[in-house]
Image: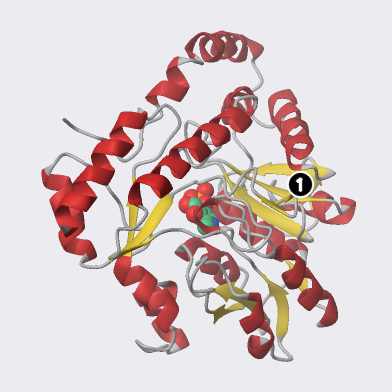
Amino acid sequence: MQIAFFSSASMHQSLKMELAAFWQKFYDSNWYVLGPEVEAFEEAYASFNQTRFCVGVANGLDALHIALKALHIGPGDEVIVPSNTYIASWLGVSQVGATPVPVEPNPSTWNIDPQRIAAAITPRARAIMPVHLYGQACEMGPIMELATRHNLAVVEDNAQAHGACWQGKLTGSFGHINGVSFYPTKNLGALGDAGAVTTNDPTLADFAKMYRNYGSKQRYYNEMPGLNSRLDALQAGILRIKLTHLTSWNAEREVLAKLYLEQLQGVAPLRLPALGMDCSSVWHLFVVLAERRDDLQAYLQERGIGTLIHYPLPPHLQAAYTDLGYKKGQFPIAESIAQQCLSLPLYPGMPVEHIEIIAAAIRGFYS
Ligand SMILES: Cc1ncc(COP(=O)(O)O)c(C=O)c1O
């Protein structure tokens, strides 16, 4: 038997007719860039995320870039980022010419530890970028307080946590301007690249709209050298259809995650994911920390069970960041997560029996 790490087949099968009808309408509309489809999705996502504005862009990395640019963050500035994150969080900072300053995660939630942020704030710091990693909301209350106290902006990287909450308030609605990715495997995924920024600030939303479109508000007149980073209209239409199912897909993910937690409880060589105080998760990934991780992964692979590692090398040790001069051992919590983390299959439509099979295989490996 083969157990895939991820499949969108079940989600897409149930939407096949709706997506086909949309495609027909879109094909005939003769309007393929920005316009009504993009606007309709922006409105729907802003309403879902409980922010005043959503501005659709080409992908999640551009969303972070545009968000930071809107805050006029650039060369000479520092942005606090988690040491444990996908490299795109750091790349967003580098793209505007600012410097990422890493802060270690809480060793049990694996998200940026608010207690450690203050020590990383220098006079050059301009913003904090919390990343709601693996689907779990960061502890946004303490982070927002710290930012206010130090006069810093907050840019949430909400690529992985559409629908997660801190104290009942949605991720992507705390920061001054926030980035979101709709990469196909995300909880809300397009059928290609897509992203957005979310904000309550009309000036920042206006900037993002201009900057994603060559720095132009009025056709052929450019206020600044911007990007072509428009959300593709076809993807916008697909995302609007999929968005109506996001809450039920997230609920399904939660049922599967709880089953894993039950089935894997008491397996001593594993550390299971833990939620921080007042933080909810939409279980974008089900990550465990495993002793003898690489052997376990190979063992599962031999039994047809697909797993992935998110992520094998933290950003500070990537060749892309040798210029920053970080050495192995400088961010030991992120490094030890990278050595032990293993993401188990979890996606809406995954048969629950698969979780039982995977848990039995893991128990077998350690017995
Ligand atoms: C935490 C995080 N930030 C940013 C991104 C970048 O998103 P995209 O792949 O849409 O550029 C991703 C997605 O892969 C991500 O996981």
Residue, disc 1:
209
Using the image, determine if residue 35 lies above or below residue 363. Answer: above
Point 62% across, 83% down: residue: 116
Q: Report the quarter where the C terminus lies.
A: bottom left
**Closer to the camera, 6 or 1?**
1
Q: Position of residue 86 (x, y in %)?
A: 46, 62
User: Which amino acid is tagged 1?
Assistant: Lys
Point 72% across, 73% down: residue: 73
Residue found farthest to the right: 202
Q: Secondary structure at mark 1?
A: helix
The answer to whether residue 166 is seen in the rendering is yes
Q: Position of residue 322 (x, y in %)?
A: 39, 83
Q: Report the quarter where the N terminus lies.
A: top left
> Left of 294 or right of it: where is 353?
right
Using the image, determine if residue 189 lies above or below residue 110. Answer: above
Using the image, determine if residue 181 lies above or below residue 189. Answer: below
Residue found farthest to the front: 266
Q: Position of residue 206 (x, y in %)?
A: 83, 50
Point 70% across, 59% down: residue: 67
Image quadrant of residue 34?
top right
